[in-house]
Image (cartoon, rainbow, N blue to C red):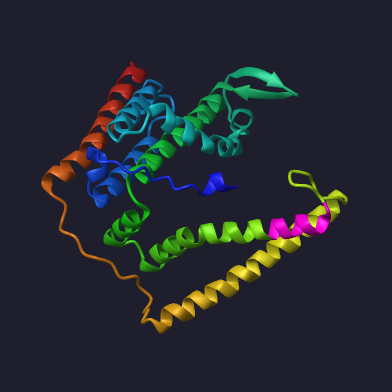
């Protein structure tokens, strides 16, 4: 469980690390938007976009293969689009269990997988080169609603606390089940489901009570509904040009890919 809650930020002194968080956030959002809007049949664009993201990762001191491996965590979620090859009209490529997969559906599914993987790399590149507190400040500076920024901050702050609470509940369950570490508890599947449901409810109650205590403590210290932060100077022209360069390269890649595909 601990691996899912590891800090993604990797300290460094690269040019990307030193870039203004506001610029990095806007650049990442524009890159993701550009990836999503890439024509699905413009296949030459995808390896070029991956090369762009890999080059940025190398500049940031992160291996391109490592970034791609971390982004592979989103691939199981793309299985939600697995029905596309069998529901979209087009030329039949193969049949399985009486269902015909069309070329149009396969192209759409492949584009969904590649776009999800590349978009995850753009987001990971932002989070691995920017401290989470700087990301919150950047979102606040970009006029994201303060309530949403506060919720994100508290979720990040207390995620480890919730993990520790869940681990204590699991240890308490194992100690009452008479099992050795690594062994499953006794009982039927229905019994284990009931125990798991009770644990989830217990965790929810504990989380709710903790949130009430935290809120009362914050109100006692003068909390007014908005997190306070330090102001920073406006981004420089060089910083804005550095942030705009990857976006311009992405636009150039897609234009070239569309021209090659249409020809």
Q: Return the residue nearer the eye: 191 or 32.
A: 191
On the image, the x and y values in percent for residue 170 come to 70, 56
Residue under the image location 31 percent in, 33 percent down: 61
Magenta part of the chain = 169-178
On the image, the x and y values in percent for residue 162 come to 57, 60
Residue under the image location 28 percent in, 48 percent down: 26
Q: Return the residue nearer the eye: 219 or 27.
A: 219
On the image, the x and y values in percent for residue 103 come to 55, 21
Using the image, determine if residue 176 lies above or below residue 113: below
**The C terminus: image quadrant:** top left
Residue under the image location 26 percent in, 52 percent down: 22
Outermost right residue: 188
Residue under the image location 34 percent in, 51 percent down: 131
- Res 14 quadrant in image: top left
Indicate left or right for 9 with 189 as reference: left
Indicate left or right for 249 with 238 as reference: right
Using the image, determine if residue 166 lies above or below residue 256: below
Outermost left residue: 237
Indicate left or right for 39 with 162 as reference: left
Give the total number of marks visible in the rendering. 0
On the image, the x and y values in percent for residue 116 come to 47, 36
Using the image, determine if residue 80 lies above or below residue 263: below
Q: Main secondary structure of the magenta part?
A: helix
- Res 210 quadrant in image: bottom right
- For residue 257: magenta? no
């Amino acid at each position: 469980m601990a691996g899912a809650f590891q800090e993604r930020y990797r300290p460094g002194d690269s040019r990307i690390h030193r870039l203004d968080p506001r610029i990095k956030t806007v650049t990442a959002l524009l890159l993701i938007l550009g990836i999503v809007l890439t024509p699905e049949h413009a296949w030459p664009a995808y390896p070029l976009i991956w090369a762009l993201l890999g080059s940025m990762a190398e500049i940031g001191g992160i291996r391109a293969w490592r970034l791609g491996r971390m982004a592979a965590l989103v691939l199981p979620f793309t299985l939600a689009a697995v029905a596309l090859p069998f529901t979209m009209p087009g030329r039949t490529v193969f049949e399985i269990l009486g269902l015909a997969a069309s070329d149009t559906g396969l192209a759409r599914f492949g584009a969904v997988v590649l776009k999800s993987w590349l978009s995850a790399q753009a987001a990971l590149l932002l989070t691995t080169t920017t401290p989470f507190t700087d990301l919150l400040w950047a979102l606040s500076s970009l006029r994201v609603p303060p309530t949403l920024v506060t919720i994100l901050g508290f979720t990040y702050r207390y995620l480890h606390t919730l993990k520790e609470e869940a681990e204590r509940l699991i240890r308490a369950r194992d100690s009452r089940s008479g099992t050795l570490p690594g062994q499953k508890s006794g009982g039927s599947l229905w019994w284990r489901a009931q125990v798991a449901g009770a644990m989830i409810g217990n965790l929810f109650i504990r989380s709710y009570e903790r949130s009430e205590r935290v809120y009362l403590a914050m109100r006692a210290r003068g909390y007014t509904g908005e997190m306070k932060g330090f102001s920073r100077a406006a981004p420089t022209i060089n910083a804005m040009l550095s942030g705009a360069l990857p976006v311009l390269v992405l636009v150039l890649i897609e234009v070239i890919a569309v021209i090659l595909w249409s020809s």
